[in-house]
Amino acid sequence: EAGVAQSPRYKIIEKRQSVAFWCNPISGHATLYWYQQILGQGPKLLIQFQNNGVVDDSQLPKDRFSAERLKGVDSTLKIQPAKLEDSAVYLCASSYPGDGETQYFGPGTRLLVL
Amino acid sequence: TQLLEQSPQFLSIQEGENLTVYCNSSSVFSSLQWYRQEPGEGPVLLVTVVTGGEVKKLKRLTFQFGDARKDSSLHITAAQPGDTGLYLCAGVGATNKLIFGTGTLLAVQP
């Protein structure tokens, strides 16, 4: 079974530029999560989707971050404009209906904002 | 705000030594999970503990959930270099939202 796929793996941009990350969850996983992990810290949930609906986006900085999962499968997370403090690893995870406590994580996208 | 504090933050030990990592919270969780994360990878689930006082063993790893379901510990016996990584506890909240701890970075020297 293929795991959670994320791209790109690395991205370097200058502040005030825009960036987008892509995630393809495990086939059949209805729930998709985006996390931000700052170096040396645990991941922080940004947004949770159930199919193509948002379940929780309470910690998403909505003035600059947006995410969508239009067809209920893959998802994109965008930052516009980026700030220095957005430098982090952005992790995508998915879970299977009925086993929501087990989340499977992708390898992450490492973002550096200069 | 629910917070999970882990201690120690960093741990460097020799192969064969034992160690314990602690995860403490002021909040009660329905269940708690432990993950290990290696460089350049996402966290991988090690165990889920559900019942207060529960003890689970996974080879050389022993996980315990506190009676009040606010704290947990991870004990590794005879650590090996392959145990090196970032250990994260995570409380499971409503809608299966994970609240991760601050992390413990473990380095096991051969």
Image: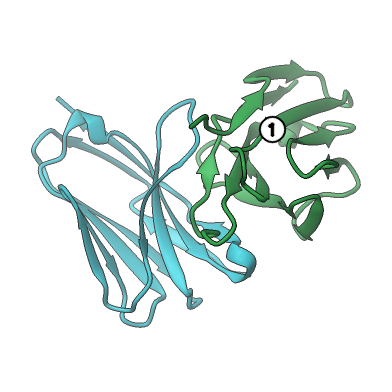
- Find numbered disc 1 in the image and state the secondary structure of the residue it sits on: strand
Q: Is residue B29 above or below residue B6?
A: below
The quadrant of the picture occupied by the N terminus of chain B is: bottom right
Q: Is residue A29 left or right of residue A20?
A: left
In the rendered image, residue B14, in percent from the top left (x then y), is placed at 14, 34
Q: Colour of chain A?
A: green
In the rendered image, residue B78, in percent from the top left (x then y), is placed at 10, 42
Mark 1 — on which chain does it sit?
A
Q: Colour of chain B?
A: cyan
Q: Is residue A92 left or right of residue A64?
A: left
Residue A31 or residue B9, whichever sits in front: A31
The quadrant in which residue B16 appears is top left
Residue drawn 62% across the image and 47% down it: A29
Q: Amino acid at mark 1?
A: Cys
The residue that mark 1 highlights is A23
In the rendered image, residue A88, in percent from the top left (x then y), is placed at 64, 33
Furthest toward the bottom, the residue is B68
Task: Count the labels in the image.
Answer: 1
Mark 1 neighbour class, 10 Å CA radius: few under 14, some 14 to 19, many 20 or more:
many
Residue A94 or residue A34, whichever sits in front: A94
